[in-house]
Image (cartoon, rainbow, N blue to C red):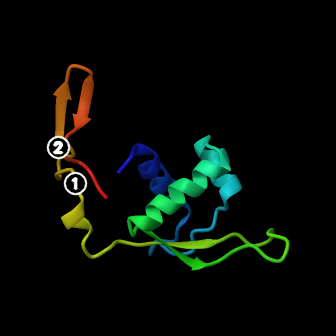
């Protein structure tokens, strides 16, 4: 998983209820918080949906395209641990030093 998607997932989690529901900050707010364009925000959200980490609970918009924001639900696919390498409990298991600094070899998700 790219760091941009990780950041977006973390930011979405701050807007979510404890069960991962009712995530509805809106693309304009997400763009302001992340410092990215609304177009890139849409890309990040699409990537998280493709990974199965985010679903649309209720579509936003309206006749003029304005109004209510889309509401999302954070999700955890049943095969997530099979598809993704994770850090160990000490949060260092997968970290390996390289000449250019630390890297997370094998810590991928797709």
Pick whichever, 75 or 90, lies toward us. 75
The spot of residue 110 in percent (x, y) is 31, 58
Residue depicted at x 62% and y 40%: 35
Pick whichever, 8 or 41, lies toward us. 41
Observer able to see residue 12: no
The spot of residue 67 in percent (x, y) is 80, 71
- Residue topped by disc 2: 94
Report the label total: 2
Residue depicted at x 45% and y 62%: 48
**For residue 56, which quarter of the picture?**
bottom right
Residue at the farthest top position: 99
Q: On the rendered structure, is 45 left or right of 33?
A: left
- Residue topped by disc 1: 86
**Image height of 26 relative to 1, above or below:** below
- CA neighbours of label 2 inside 10 A, class few (<14), some (14 to 19), many (20+): some
Q: On the rendered structure, is 42 left or right of 6?
A: right
The spot of residue 36 in percent (x, y) is 61, 43
The label number, if any, that marks residue 37 in the structure image = none
Dot 2 falls on a residue whose secondary structure is loop
**Image height of 34 relative to 53, above or below:** above
Residue depicted at x 81% and y 68%: 66
Residue at the farthest right position: 64
Dot 1 falls on a residue whose secondary structure is loop
Observer able to see residue 59: yes
Residue depicted at x 56% and y 62%: 15
Marks 2 and 1, Cα distance to the nearest angstrom?
A: 8 Å
Instruction: Pick whichever of labels 2 and 1 is earlier in the sequence.
Output: 1
The spot of residue 73 in percent (x, y) is 50, 74
- CA neighbours of label 1 inside 10 A, class few (<14), some (14 to 19), many (20+): some
Whether residues under marks 2 and 1 lie with C-beta atoms below 8 angstroms apart, the answer is: yes
């Amino acid at each position: 998983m790219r760091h941009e998607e990780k950041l977006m997932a973390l930011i979405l989690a701050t807007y979510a209820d404890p069960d991962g529901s009712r995530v509805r900050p809106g693309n304009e707010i997400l763009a302001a918080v992340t410092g990215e364009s609304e177009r890139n925000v849409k890309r990040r959200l699409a990537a998280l949906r493709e990974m199965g980490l985010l679903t649309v609970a209720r579509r936003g918009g309206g006749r003029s395209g304005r109004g209510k924001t889309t509401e999302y639900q954070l999700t955890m696919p049943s095969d997530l641990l099979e598809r993704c390498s994770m850090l160990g409990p000490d949060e260092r298991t997968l970290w390996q030093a390289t000449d250019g600094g630390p890297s997370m070899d094998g810590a991928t998700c797709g």
